[in-house]
Amino acid sequence: MDHDDHHDHGSELSEMQLRVRALETVLAEKGYIDPSALDAIVEAYETKVGPHTGARVVAKAWSDPAFRQALLADASKAVASFGLLNRVGDHLIAVENTPKQHNMIVCTLCSCYPWEVLGLPPVWYKSAPYRSRAVNDPRGVLADFGVTLPADTQIRVWDSTAETRFIVLPMRPGGTEGWNEDKLAALVTRDSMIGTGIAKNPQGAV
Amino acid sequence: MDGVHDMGGMHGFGKVEPEQNEPVFHAPWEGRTYAINRALGYTGIWTIDETRAGIESLPPEVYLGSSYYRKWELRLEKLLVEKDLAGSDELKAGHALRPGKALKRTMRAEDVANALTRGSFARPAQAPARFKPGDKVRTKNIHPATHTRLPRYARGKVGVVEAVRGCHVYPDTVAIGQGENPQWLYTVLFDGRELWGEASDPSLKVSIEAFEPYLEMA
């Protein structure tokens, strides 16, 4: 197919399919990339890396006070000792929600996000509405997610402007006393670890 | 660079629209674009800051009018041509017309499991940290035409150093080929009213991760 014919009958999607195919072919022929490595990367992000990892970290922090302390002191180290997880980078920071303070994570300049514990960010996280408003209208952003916080809760927004990465440790929902970590992890949503949501209420859980 | 990418505090972009059960990639080309970026990053031909600068310097109408991974793809083409690793004639033809250059390493399928961990950006300190937690600092009013990680909304503002995060690669120099030039990194906390004026939500506090050259004692 001619690379230029998309102007006649293509959507952005088909234009991009052709363009990326051309790019990948050139790079493979030049020996810069191995297409089978690309397959493995896509597979890893589609099937292995994702917010289920962060949810397990949060559930453990809710269950194990020593782990919670270690996580808040040095999240990279605490998560590395957790076992079974993918190794994380060196600059992970966990920030804890309390009745007095709600934390929210943004990257106003690009799309910095803790890939290893949450996977790749959703489109809204990388979008102009979120990046522009999170720092000056976080309550309005929370309303877009259907979340209302008490007026006297302080909102703390963390702009990820360097290589440090942040994960929110949401508040543990009431009515979960005695729950094991697997059951707790099912209450931890991706958005609750970004700070645009709160953990699920146990009545809503399976 | 005072570009359209520096969005903090801008108005008019509308509501945040979460997508239920969003897939990781919305089309196969998005996954390939992501993976090509990771595989090329692994070869060491450019730094993460050069790639960010590559996106920021797309024409503003292209930046605002393109989906996320389309920006990544356009950035790839641009950097490959700028660094003379591929020709625009080759990208147009969809085939290599000349042999590739020798790279330090390439990513094979068996490397992927270990190569997905982010590298460390911490570097040995060149000097003691100038600030400590609790110090009142003012961000500088700087407007470099090149890459910086000090957002516009937080320039010339007074905040408090909350934490020292170690000494890290300095994006402002590494992005323009002037070396890693490691600098101390701080979490600096601002009151919402300092950033947005008296009309700000009084319960709002915002922090940035600020490199030492962005700061002066207030």
Image (cartoon, coloured by chain):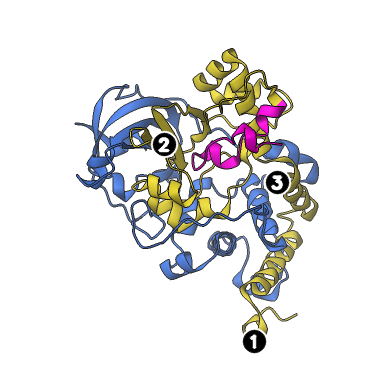
In front of the other: label 2 or label 3? 3
Secondary structure category for the residue under label 2? loop
Query: Distance of mark 2 from mark 3, alpha carbons?
Result: 33 Å
Q: Chain of mark 1?
A: A
Q: Are marks 2 and 3 on the same chain?
A: no
Asked whether B62 or B101 is in front, the reply is B62
Of all chains in the rendering, the one displayed in yellow is A
In front of the other: label 1 or label 2? 1
Tag 1 near tag 2, CB within 8 Å: no
The residue under the point 65% across, 58% down is B33
Q: At label 3, which amino acid type do we have?
A: Tyr
Query: Hey, which quadrant is residue A153 in on the image?
Result: top left
Q: Are marks 3 and 1 on the same chain?
A: yes
Pointer 3: what residue? Answer: A45
The magenta stretch is A182-206
Secondary structure category for the residue under label 1? helix
Q: Colour of chain B?
A: blue
Is disc 3 surrounded by few (<14), some (14 to 19) or many (20+) residues within 10 Å?
Answer: many
- Whole-percent x, y for residue B30 in the image: 66, 59
Residue B185 visible in image:
yes
- Whole-percent x, y for residue A186 in the image: 68, 34
- Whole-percent x, y for residue A137 in the image: 35, 48
Q: At label 2, which amino acid type do we have?
A: Asn
Tag 3 near tag 1, CB within 8 Å: no
Asked whether A163 or A79 is in front, the reply is A79
| Label number found at residue A8 | 1
* Residue A33 on the magenta span: no
Q: At label 1, which amino acid type do we have?
A: Asp
Query: Distance of mark 3 from mark 1, alpha carbons?
Result: 34 Å
| Label number found at residue B181 | 2
